[in-house]
């Protein structure tokens, strides 16, 4: 592993905190999803049940803290604040890429959070490009075992890798995913990093025994922008940074091709209304990453406050739609077809 990877991780954090890294011309498409308002909900708002199950674990709400960081001191502090908040809120936590901890033993402590989050759904994370380059089930099991993870996310990020001059050989990727999904004792989640999983990729995943697909659609953080800021201090190829499958379309396309696989909605999920719209499109849960970065630097209390406000808004929108639980939101929406749901 290049010596500069820890510096790059530090720069990722700095850029995400200080620069404009959102997509500039693309949106998530979730703004076009109509929430079906119901004036006679026959519900107690405070009694709405946000609980759900994902990857074999029970969550108090359909919410995961998305993959962000790790590998250096500040990343470790962030991960521990996120873990404590996840435990207190009863939500899931996805770790940042663990490649650095496998290849740099001194980085392992920054991913060790199970002591703070003994009960949460904890998802490990490695890149598909590393499996193409030589990783196998042994490295995947090590990543899972060393942090006590309940599942392993494998991120597919060809555009990000190309922009950063990283690992750009993705040949045979589906075969590697198939071997991992068959060999690992925990579920495998396939995810993007913010440029979306669309119909063609979903078709390639058909037949694999996956635990979930995190669509990580376009409309939130553009990692093609982040990597340009890291490399050049500016976005020198703005059109390239706008490439991606918007989150709403990704949810529908993955759902139409893989109807039996749970979908996680990430990529531009910024509030409870976004989450409600994602549930209407069939998402099992949502994941939020960059908006929690600054709160995590302030500490677990700030993260808890942010998540509680988010979930309070989700509960209000569900109440307004007349949905008493997550399953009711799914019934109100469409799992495929036009973006705007139709009330049955």
Image: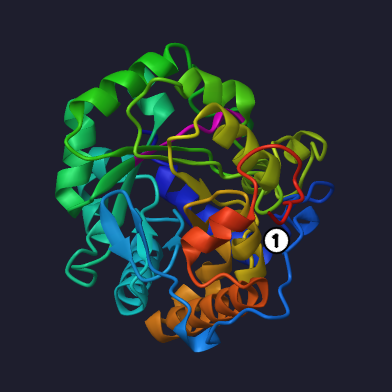
On the picture, is 171 further left or further right than 137?
A: right
The quadrant holding residue 331 is bottom right
The quadrant holding residue 161 is top right
On the picture, is 25 further left or further right than 191?
A: right
Find the magenta span and give its range. 153-161
In front here: 59 or 298? Answer: 59
Where is residue 233 drawn, in percent x and y? 70, 50
The relative height of residue 341 versus residue 165 in the rendered view (above or below) is: below
In front here: 135 or 180? Answer: 180
Where is residue 309 drawn, in percent x and y? 55, 82
> Which image quadrant: the C terminus?
bottom right
Secondary element under disc 1, as helix, strand or loop, is: loop
Q: Identify the residue shown where x is 57% and y is 34%.
A: 254
Q: Identify the residue shown where x is 32% and y is 79%.
A: 88
Q: Is residue 136 visible?
A: no
- Residue named by callout 1: 19
Q: Reply yes or no: does residue 160 show up in magenta.
A: yes
The relative height of residue 233 versus residue 40 in the rendered view (above or below) is: above
Where is residue 21 drawn, in percent x and y? 70, 55
In front here: 265 or 53? Answer: 53
The relative height of residue 299 versus residue 314 in the rendered view (above or below) is: below
Q: Is residue 303 visible?
A: yes
> Which image quadrant: the N terminus?
top left
In front here: 57 or 222? Answer: 57
The relative height of residue 246 versus residue 176 in the rendered view (above or below) is: below
């Amino acid at each position: 592993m290049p010596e500069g990877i820890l510096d790059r991780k530090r720069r990722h954090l700095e850029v995400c905190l200080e620069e404009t890294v959102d997509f500039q011309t693309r949106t998530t498409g979730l703004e076009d999803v109509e929430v079906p308002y119901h004036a006679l909900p026959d519900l107690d708002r405070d009694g709405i049940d946000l609980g759900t199950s994902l990857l074999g674990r029970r969550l108090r709400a359909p919410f995961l803290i998305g993959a962000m960081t790790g590998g250096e001191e500040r990343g470790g502090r962030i991960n521990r604040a996120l873990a404590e908040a996840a435990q207190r809120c009863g939500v899931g936590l996805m770790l940042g890429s663990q490649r650095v901890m496998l290849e740099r033993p001194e980085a392992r402590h920054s991913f060790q959070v199970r002591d703070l989050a003994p009960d949460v759904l904890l998802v490990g994370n490695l890149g598909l490009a590393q499996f193409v380059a030589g990783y196998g089930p042994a490295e995947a099991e090590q990543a899972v075992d060393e942090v006590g993870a309940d599942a392993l996310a494998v991120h597919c990020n060809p555009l990000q890798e190309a922009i950063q001059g990283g690992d750009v050989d993705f040949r045979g990727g589906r075969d590697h995913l198939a071997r991992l999904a068959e060999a690992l004792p925990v579920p495998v989640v396939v995810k993007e990093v913010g440029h979306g999983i669309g119909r063609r990729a979903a078709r390639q995943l058909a037949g694999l025994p996956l635990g979930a697909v995190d669509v990580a659609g376009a409309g939130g953080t553009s990692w093609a922008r982040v990597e340009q800021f890291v490399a050049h201090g500016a976005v020198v190829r703005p059109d390239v940074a706008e490439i991606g499958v918007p989150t709403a379309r990704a949810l529908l396309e993955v759902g139409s091709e893989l109807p039996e696989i749970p979908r996680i909605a990430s990529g531009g999920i910024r509030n409870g209304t976004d989450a409600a719209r994602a549930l209407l499109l069939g998402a099992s849960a949502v994941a939020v990453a960059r908006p929690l970065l600054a709160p995590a630097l302030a500490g677990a209390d700030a993260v808890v406050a942010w998540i509680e406000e988010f979930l309070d808004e989700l509960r209000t929108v569900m109440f307004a739609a007349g949905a008493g639980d997550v399953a009711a939101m799914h019934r109100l929406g469409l799992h495929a077809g036009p973006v705007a749901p139709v009330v049955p």
